[in-house]
Image (cartoon, rainbow, N blue to C red):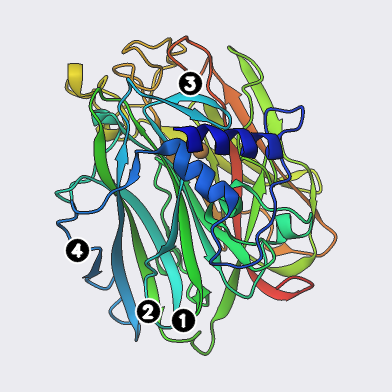
Amino acid sequence: MKLQSYLSVVLTAQLSNASLLPRGLPVVHDKRQMSIASIAVTALNSPYGKVAGVQKLPSKVDMPSAHPEVPGFKTVKVRYGPYKVPNMGKVTRTLTGPEEGALWNYPDQNIQKPCTGDCVIVGIRPDYEDLNGESVNVDNGHWLHHIVLLSSNTRADPTCAARGTGSLPHWVVGFNPASSERLFASGNERTTVRLFDMGITDAGYVVKKADTFAMIVDLMNMNMEDSTLYVVINYDIIEGPLPKGMSEIKPLWLDVDQCGFSEAKAKSQAGSYKLGSVPWKSNVDGELIVLGGHIHDGGTGLLFKVDGTTICDSRAGYGETAKYISGGGKANATPAAPAAPAAPAAPAAGAAGHGHGGAGVPHISSMVLCWKGKKELKLPQIKTGQTWTVEATYDYKERAGATHPNGQQENVMGIGVVWIKKANSAIR
Ligand SMILES: [Cu+2]
């Protein structure tokens, strides 16, 4: 405990500006090096996090190929963890305030990749599973709050490297933004990108044998007992180097707390507000492949804007299946309501002692994706000199936000991930 409080103090002091969301963590230069942030964040989550000895299921499973007609195409399921998540009665003192029942931005370093040699990722579908391999969700109080997948390689993370800083995911996994990239993020909506199913067969994300993968997992447990669960990523890959006729995908990350903690304070406790990102001036040319947002409950959507014009409206869907309607946790579980267009829910004031777990409350179950060839994507190309921003909208009259036990709205997010096919660029 002494170490934990010492590290928290040191790290918080290092991070501290006047703002809630501090910046300026030291950048580490060895991609395998444990950063101060990774030690500190692991310590503040202690004794929770990755646990050994309870793994009964294989960590990597070859699934039937989603596209057997494509040579080398494989669908691989990887189970990460399992991670022990504290119960609602436990408070984790995070760097952005106390959280109940939370494993907070926990770093898992040097994780299993979908291939041991070279491969190309053409699909990602995250999930959250119990120790028996059953998918779990908020109907039973298990919340895949968010995950961020990073690769340390020879490329750079354009939106943060250009500012000479990393972001929380870089800091806590010990990656340098000049030689790593945040390639994918999802919340409990479990955003699924399967390029071949979207009609995109000429682009993929390159993984080399020497690359290192890491992930931050932010998990919430609305039950009164600890849980131990796997984060799952189902990958579609093509084995080997980039096939002829395919181009490399470059991920770009936009955020209302750009190159920070990705968290922002709720601007109001009721009603609506918008959160915008700092503008990012593009230094890359290429084709837009797929764009999608991540926001929190209470949010209605995230807009991608180029030179002030909306090019993708990533709206949030709520409670589209029964699994996305909370039953109030195991302690007082009720049969989940049928999935129906959610009626405007009253701001959750903690019906089950916590705003996440109010029985019958619908939660975000999807985010609209915009992709090449789909009408939702209003612009085909990214160009040098364009100004890119994202803007999240929250409306607590329309959608219940996640609240602390005292009824106060929790911090929120507004993240946009863009995959592009690079034509030429100043960035790697
Ligand atoms: Cu989030």
How far apart are labels 4 and 2 at the CA level? Answer: 16 Å
**Residue at the image position 44 percent from the left and 16 percent from the top:** 344
Quadrant location of residue 189?
top left
Amino acid type of the residue tagged 3 in the rendering = Arg
Residue 428 horizontal side relative to residue 409, left or right: right
Few, some or many residues within 10 Å of mark 2 (<14, 14–19, 20+)? some
**Residue at the image position 46 percent from the left and 25 percent from the top:** 99
**Residue at the image position 24 percent from the left and 26 percent from the top:** 338
Label 3, on which residue?
A: 399
Disc on the earlier residue, 4 or 2: 4
Label 1, on which residue?
A: 209
Q: Are marks 3 and 4 in contact (CB under 8 Å)?
A: no
x%, y% of residue 188?
39, 40
Question: For this rendering, which residue is in front, 401 or 195?
Answer: 401
Number of numbered discs present? 4
Q: Are marks 1 and 2 in contact (CB under 8 Å)?
A: yes
Q: In this rendering, which labeled residue sits more in front, label 3 or label 2?
A: 2
- Quadrant location of the C terminus in the rendered image: bottom right
How far apart are labels 3 and 2 at the CA level? Answer: 43 Å
x%, y% of residue 401?
49, 21
Q: Disc 4 on helix, strand or loop?
A: loop
Label 2, on which residue?
A: 116
Q: Is residue 201 visible?
A: yes
Does the beta carbon of the residue at mark 1 sit less than 8 Å from ligand 1?
no
Label 4, on which residue?
A: 58
Few, some or many residues within 10 Å of mark 3 (<14, 14–19, 20+)? many
How far apart are labels 1 and 2 at the CA level? Answer: 6 Å
Q: In this rendering, which labeled residue sits more in front, label 3 or label 4?
A: 4
**Residue at the image position 19 percent from the left and 16 percent from the top:** 332
